Image: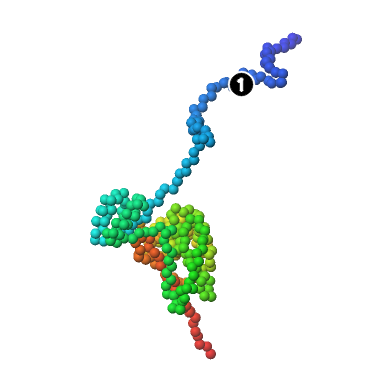
Amino acid sequence: MQIVFAINELKPAKLINLSDDGFKTPGKKQTAKATEKHNPFRIPVNNKFANIEEETSSNAQVTVTDDHSPTKPPPIMLALTANYTHALQEIHRKFPKTENKLTKGYIKIFPDTEDSYRKIITYLTNAKYEYYIIRPRNERPLKIDVKRLPIDTNIDEICYVETQVPLHGGEATIISLNLNNQDALIIASIHIPPSSDNALFTLDLEILIQLGSNVILCGDFNAKHIVRNCNNINTRGNNLINFCNNTFTELIAPTTPTRFGFNSASTTDLALIKNFFYPFEIFSLPELNSDHNPIKIAFKFNYDITSNYLTKKTD
């Protein structure tokens, strides 16, 4: 019996290169091919200050610039009289850069410089034209009209004490009526400019309603909402409604518009009432030559309380 062993051919062993520190060199199948790296996106780096000379104590100069552009003078309101066209022609001839705009029976004349403003006023005064000027807010006098005071009221007892109330973006004129045997009534005429923050203006309202227990805030809030007789809603209107709901403040507005634009009308002059529970009526009065109508609030302090009690006769 013969036994045959099949012996396969032995493959040569792979060469393994070991360095002195034990590093193993990988084989050809385990190495990746070297590829050329190409980055199509390149960021240009440029030193913009390379051409600037170093400042020394001998040539260093400081230049102060005023970033505030000069403010334009307020408009001049020229009445529409019989000879107003002659005045406009003369003003346009002498001051061609002025602009004119028609508004509610008057011509608004917008001078370009303070010098033109003074010369136009001098011309209108000497020619005896009917006009008036709109003073800036910081130059307007503060006047308070109190009607229907008792006959025995001593006017000298009405005192005025100026108190500064820090506000963030709004403007307000505030009076305090100290009534006999009652809490003081705080009345404020407020203006929230369109440039103020739509969310932070409520901080000013919160400061004002905390001045007393009975507060009335009236003025131009520049806030629009359909619940207060406006055709649209803006961000400030939503924030004002939320503020009134959170502080339990009543927001009232007249039924007719208070602000009139070129092709629009809206109700932006409103009133906020805090803890003053009297019946009232509010109106929009077309009495001023302005794009805003004043609002009038009439509170009814003397009113009859109806009784629903039923009287029965019993034995």
Q: Give how far across and how far down residue 295 sits, in percent.
A: 40, 65
For residue 43, above or below residue 275: above
Name which residue lies at 51% across and 71% down: 178
For residue 117, above or below residue 42: below
How dense is the environment of label 1, judged by Cα within 10 Å: few (below 14), some, or many (20 and up)? few
Q: Amino acid at mark 1?
A: Thr
Furthest residue toward front: 58
Instruction: Evaluate whether residue 207 shows in this view.
Output: yes
Judging by the rendered image, the residue that carries numbered circle 1 is 31
For residue 22, above or below residue 224: above
For residue 29, above or below residue 83: above
Q: How was this image coloured?
A: rainbow
> Viewer-proximal residue, 79 or 233?
79
Q: Quadrant of the N terminus?
A: top right
Name which residue lies at 51% across and 27% down: 39
Furthest residue toward top: 2
**In this rendering, would 28 be left or right of 143?**
right
Furthest residue toward right: 1
**In this rendering, would 31 be left or right of 270?**
right
Name which residue lies at 38% across and 65% down: 284
Furthest residue toward bottom: 315
Name which residue lies at 48% across and 53% down: 197
> Viewer-proximal residue, 44 or 114?
114
Q: Give how far across and how far down residue 66 sits, in percent.
A: 45, 46
> Viewer-proximal residue, 109 or 312?
109
Q: Give how far across and how far down residue 181 sits, in percent.
A: 53, 75
Q: Give how far across and how far down residue 206 sits, in percent.
A: 52, 60
Instruction: Evaluate whether residue 263 shows in this view.
Output: no
* Callout 1 secondary element: loop
Q: Quadrant of residue 11?
A: top right
User: How many numbered discs, if any?
Assistant: 1
